[in-house]
Amino acid sequence: MLAKIFAMFWKRNPNCLCNTPLSQQECESVEIPIQREALAYLRTALNNPQASFREGQWESIEQLLMGNRVLVVQRTGWGKSMVYFLATKLLRERGSGPTLLISPLLSLMRNQLESAGRIGVKARTINSTNNGEWEDIQRELSADQVDVLLISPERLANNDFRQNILTSMVNNIGLFAVDEAHCISDWGHDFRPDYRRIVRVLQALPSYVPVLATTATANDRVVSDIKEQLGRNIILQRGSLVRKSLKLQNINMPSPAARMAWLAQTIPYLPGSGIVYTLTQRDAERVAEWLRFNHINAKAYHAAISGRGNCGSAREELEQQLLNNEIKVLVATVALGMGFDKPDLGFVIHFQRPASVVHYYQQVGRAGRAVDDAYGILLCGEEDDHIADYFIQNAFPPQQHVSEILAALDESEKGLSVPEIQRVLNLRRSQIDNALRLLTVESPSPITKIGYKWLLTPSAASYRVNQEYIDAITEIRRAEQQQMSDYMGHSGCLMSFLQAALDDPAPSNCGQCRNCTPALLLDESYDSDLANRAGFFLRRNYQPLFPRRSWPARNMFTRSALRGYRIPQEQQAQVGRALCLWRDAGWGELVARGKYTSSRFSDELVVACVEMLRAWSPSPAPKWVTCIPSLNHPELVPDFSARLASKLRIPFVPCVRKVYANRQQKDMENSFQQVKNLDGVFSITAQCREDECLLIDDVVGSGWTFTVVSALLRRAGCSAVYPMALASNSQRMD
């Protein structure tokens, strides 16, 4: 193995990497041919005969060839992937085993893999979307036909992978590489519990195996933590974070409609193609739709889009369209982040303020890598703090959830699957998954998985969540949020602020941000008529309500006449509509005020629902109106429904009766508990009519109340039920 051989006669010193008995000429005779070989591969990989190593690239490769551990902290676009691919090529040619590369976003490494392929590095990946290829890849690994195996950190939790592939690889790994290594650190902005397993794999590796960790976003605190976990002897390769081509500008624009107007009038005049980042999936969809409405070729990109294509092909196609400049802009969440490389990206705009300086630098740094001028524009909105608070509060499972899950497993002799846990506990699937993920990476873990069942281990009896640790992380997140707010109002150089916040050893003024040279940047005004149209667009952001086709489990009902697992078609609702999203910029805040402040929904909402019905145009049209009653607010929804029925000139028939007071649906966290909570709660009176009806509620969450009442109305003879809500609280759907 080359690393072993080099370690025997190469001595690290500032001037030469050879053992002192060798002369400088003899040293160069060993060193330079390898460096020239690496340079030739670099030029082939980049398809650029004039390419040369960036400062620190060859030095990092050199240390890996000597069998050392290296932490590379360099700006986005510096070429960190070239370090592990070129090191792999050189090591493989000299008889080393394959590289094991761990990356959190395998789907975003396609362009790097193309570069690796040009120098003959054969890379394969094992992930949840290619199960059918696992056996072939395993055979190729056994035959030493794979140069790089890429996996996600979550794959290390898979028993089949650990037993059948990882165990056989451990003693033959030529290079162990961890991409986006800041995820290892508990204190990093993007800590992922599954990364803790990486340290355990490292402990099982022979000491002579070289290790590479790379990141663009690690301050001194995170660097120190990575060193503690990967080894204090790790060699730090750190460079400047400044991006000279990037023109930074901050614009405080609280109103979403104003920001949308500014985007629509500014983006057509920006160079090349770019990215608009949003904090939520629904904003990505909505902003993309608004830009298309204004004749800008824009598409949305977020994690949920992978479900629309085959094995993520929909997202891959979107990435390729942006890479090829076939679209002007992708409106994306953080799903388009680490690993995506488009050197000629002309602009990155943030529709909302990210949670931390690290998040912001990582995202805005995607622009201007290979162009002279690029824009990084940060817009600040009234909703930013609320969204950031939500993510901070939901980052860790509370002790109560962990205790409930451990208690439920303790009471089960044969263990519980996740659906079975949902039947026992009033927890959302996401809450259960988060708690299980945290528990599985603890050492020792209080739980284990056999098949689809989770069971307790002996260490469960003494396990407690480390609340002090969680509180410390939360405090850091709050400080990061405040630092980002400080950046928004900073009057000095913006690039220098980012460098200092990330502990760049030499922050300096850039001379081209909004604060350094105001004349270089973009007009911050927007057309008021365009903003009014954006406001109208937000108010017409109707949400479809798709009917449920089956109950969460068989025989859910004991008090109701509803039966079975599949909901018969003759008991299903039609596709419905919600006027808006709860507390959203359009009608959402007005709905919230009507529900909790004024105790009456405004006439504006009645008119808005009439307009929505005209645009919706259900066929056949509803002939009467009814509503879902509430014992807590008995007049609120019936009053609104009667006024709407009057405007529509059809009768209001209050034929749905609430039999007893159940728990509020908003307190029920998963589908099983939500349906169970509705068993026998409603009945239908003899007033029910046989023709089509409009069924009204104020806020729809999971949709199960609509589903149950619609089924009861259909059983009572109603020919069609159209659910309609004033607002959809879509994030409650499970």
Image: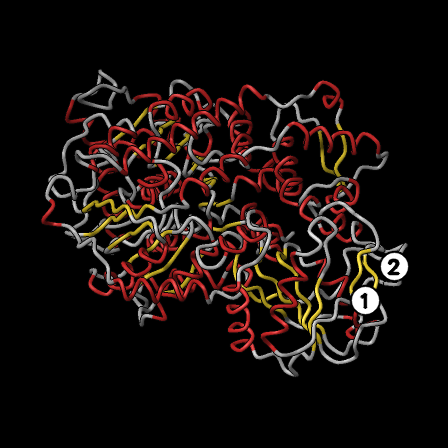
Q: Observer-nearest residue: 677 or 275?
A: 677
Q: Is residue 362 visible?
A: yes
Give the left or right position of residue 163, taking residue 126 as reference. right
Could you tell me how far apart the alpha carbons at marks 2 and 1 are, in whole angstroms? 9 Å
* Residue at left offset 44%, top offset 46%: 147
Q: Is residue 58 visible?
A: no
Which residue is the extreme one toward the top? 20
Image location (x, y in percent) of residue 21: 22, 16
The numbered mark, 2 or 1, whose residue comes first in the sequence reads 2
Q: Observer-nearest residue: 230 or 492?
A: 492
Q: Observer-nearest residue: 116 or 75?
A: 75
The image shows residue 86, relative to residue 135, as above or below, that is above
Q: Which residue is mark 1?
A: 712
Give the left or right position of residue 660, taking residue 290 as reference. right
Q: Secondary structure at mark 1?
A: helix
Image location (x, y in percent) of residue 80: 32, 40
The image shows residue 201, relative to residue 691, as above or below, that is above
Where residue 166 sits, quadrant-wise, is top right
Where residue 668 sits, quadrant-wise, is top right
Q: Are marks 2 and 1 in contact (CB under 8 Å)?
A: yes
Q: Which residue is mark 2?
A: 560
Where residue 30 sits, quadrant-wise, is top left
Q: Amino acid at mark 1?
A: Leu
Image location (x, y in percent) of residue 286: 43, 61
Which residue is the extreme one toward the bottom? 620
The image shows residue 530, relative to residue 680, as above or below, that is below
* Residue at left offset 60%, top offset 30%: 441
* Residue at left offset 42%, top offset 57%: 284
